[in-house]
Image (cartoon, rainbow, N blue to C red):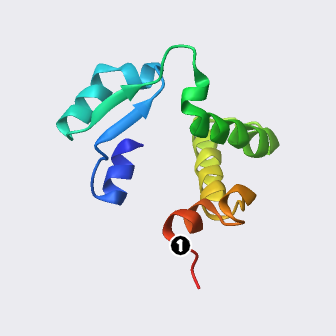
Amino acid sequence: MFKQAQASEGKVTSLIHTDRGAAYTSRAFNQYLAINGASHSYSAPGTPADNAVIEYWWADFKAIWIARMPKAQTLVELEQQVRDGINYFTHKFISGTRNDLTAAEFRFGKAN
């Protein structure tokens, strides 16, 4: 995912803040950050509020998207559901906390 973001943005941000999940404490991930000149900040153990924005996003993603999908029968189906959900929340889901804009409109400006 970080490599896709890097390809899209053309760089890795200078500071990455994550929880202490296995994916983020792995040697491979931290080497990737170091090679790309990014510092790594961790939330304190047992403090999900430290990552409130992404925790809130995942809660919405699971409650609004995944819970309404038929149970994926294969990994390929699950991956497609996740891709479709990310697309939905990025380009179609309008939020009052973003002035009734989608996430993409909020970040990049509403297309005229």
The spot of residue 16 in percent (x, y) is 37, 37
| Image-quadrant location for residue 7 | bottom left
Amino acid type of the residue that numbered disc 1 sits on in the rendered structure: Gly
In this view, the residue farthest toward the top is 45
Q: Position of residue 64 (x, y in %)?
A: 77, 45
Left or right of 40 in this view: 75? right
Q: Which residue is mark 1?
A: 109
User: Quick one: 26 or 12, which is closer to the camera?
Assistant: 12
The image quadrant where one finds the C terminus is bottom right
Q: Quadrant of the N terminus?
A: top left
Q: How many marks?
A: 1
Residue at 64 percent of width and 37 percent of height: 58
Can you see residue 106? yes
* Residue displayed at 64% across by 63% down: 102
Q: Nearer the viewer, residue 12 or 87?
A: 12
> Which residue is nearer to you in this view: 78 or 97?
97
- Element under disc 1: loop
Mark 1, Cα crowd under 10 Å, few <14 / some 14-19 / many 20+, is few
- Which residue occupies 69% across, 42% down? 61
Q: Residue at x 66, y 38 (%)?
A: 56
User: Which quadrant of the view contains residue 34?
Assistant: top left
Q: Position of residue 45 (x, y in %)?
A: 51, 14
Task: Tell which residue pokes out farthest to the bottom in this image.
Answer: 112
- Toward the viewer: 77 or 81? 81
The answer to whether residue 70 shows anywhere in this view is no
In the image, residue 23 above or below residue 99: above
